[in-house]
Image (cartoon, helix red, strand yellow):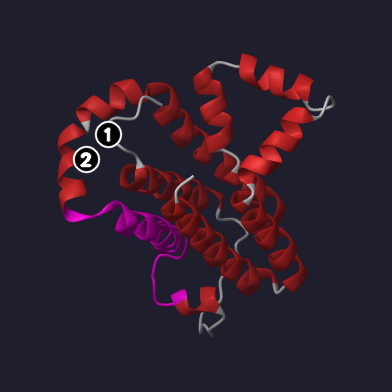
Amino acid sequence: MSKRFIAVFIAYVVFFSWLDWIMHRSLVFVIVVGGGLIIVVLNKSRIGELILSGMWARPFVERWQRLPEHVRQYLVSTTPLLYFLIRGQGTSDGGALVVIAALLVSGAFVFFGHVIDPKLQSFYAKRDKILARPVRMVLAPVLAILIAFLVVHGSLADLPALFGGETSSPQSPMGLSGQLFLATLLAAVCTALLLREGGEQA
């Protein structure tokens, strides 16, 4: 595991821990989950060896390895939804549609990437010339948040409210299922187009 990967992963954890703190103000969750993820990635090989050496884990590992590669990739790509289901939904009533939208986009790229990627080769080439991968990795969550906020709220004027600022026109997340579905679709597609490598076979 490269030092760059570890640094980027830790940066992502810190970023989303900050967002979680803004939304929930739970220092315990940030420390336990955020710190736990950082410890896991720093000790991935040791933890992997420990799990594989345990008799209790062997049946689960064998079942996982028997799954088709695309299914495993799909399950891994959808793990961030666990956070949304547990923490990110808040008071919204569109949780199910958000999950469906994310599953659709992830499934499209995982199972049909061999069809999608050739059609996007020129886009990938131009994207890579303009934006280096580290820049794209920073832009991905930022643009996803901006797109989602714009679609749901219809304006970026109240964006400071997302970061603990004040808003003159507070809006309830109830009754916005359609906007949340569309916002998730657009944000997920934008993220995939920024981060996906043209040569991936997933």
The answer to which of 36 and 73 lies nearer the viewer is 36
The picture places residue 168, in percent across and down from the top left corner, at 51, 84
x 32%, y 21%: residue? 114
> For the residue marked with disc 1, what is the amino acid?
Gly
As drawn, the residue found furthest toward the right would be 56
Q: Quadrant of residue 193?
A: top left
Q: What residue appears at the point 51 percent right and 59 percent down from the top-left corner? A: 12
Q: Is residue 94 visible?
A: no
Percent coordinates x, y for residue 26 in the rendering: 74, 71
Q: Where in the figure is residue 82, as x and y percent of width and height?
A: 66, 45
Q: Residue at x 52, y 37 (%)?
A: 77
| Residue 34 colored in magenta in the image | no
- Tag 1 residue: 198
Whether residues under marks 2 and 1 lie with C-beta atoms below 8 angstroms apart, the answer is yes
Q: Which residues are magenta?
A: 130-159
Q: Residue 128, image x and y in percent?
A: 21, 47
Q: Is residue 170 left or right of residue 147?
A: right
Q: Which residue is mark 2?
A: 124
Q: Earlier in the sequence, mark 2 or mark 1?
A: 2
Q: Alpha-carbon neighbours of circle 1 within 10 Å: few (<14), some, or many (≥20)? A: many
For label 2, the SS is helix
- Classify mark 2: residues with Cα within 10 Å, few (<14), some (14-19) or many (20+): many
Q: Is residue 42 visible?
A: yes
- Up-down relation of residue 109 to residue 47 (above or below): above
Query: Which residue is located at x 40 percent, y 77 percent?
Result: 157
Q: Is residue 86 left or right of residue 182?
A: right
- The amino acid at mark 2 is Tyr
Q: Is residue 144 above or below residue 18?
A: above
* Location of the C terminus (image quadrant): top left
Image-quadrant location for residue 176: bottom right
Looking at this view, is 82 or 182 the one in front? Answer: 82
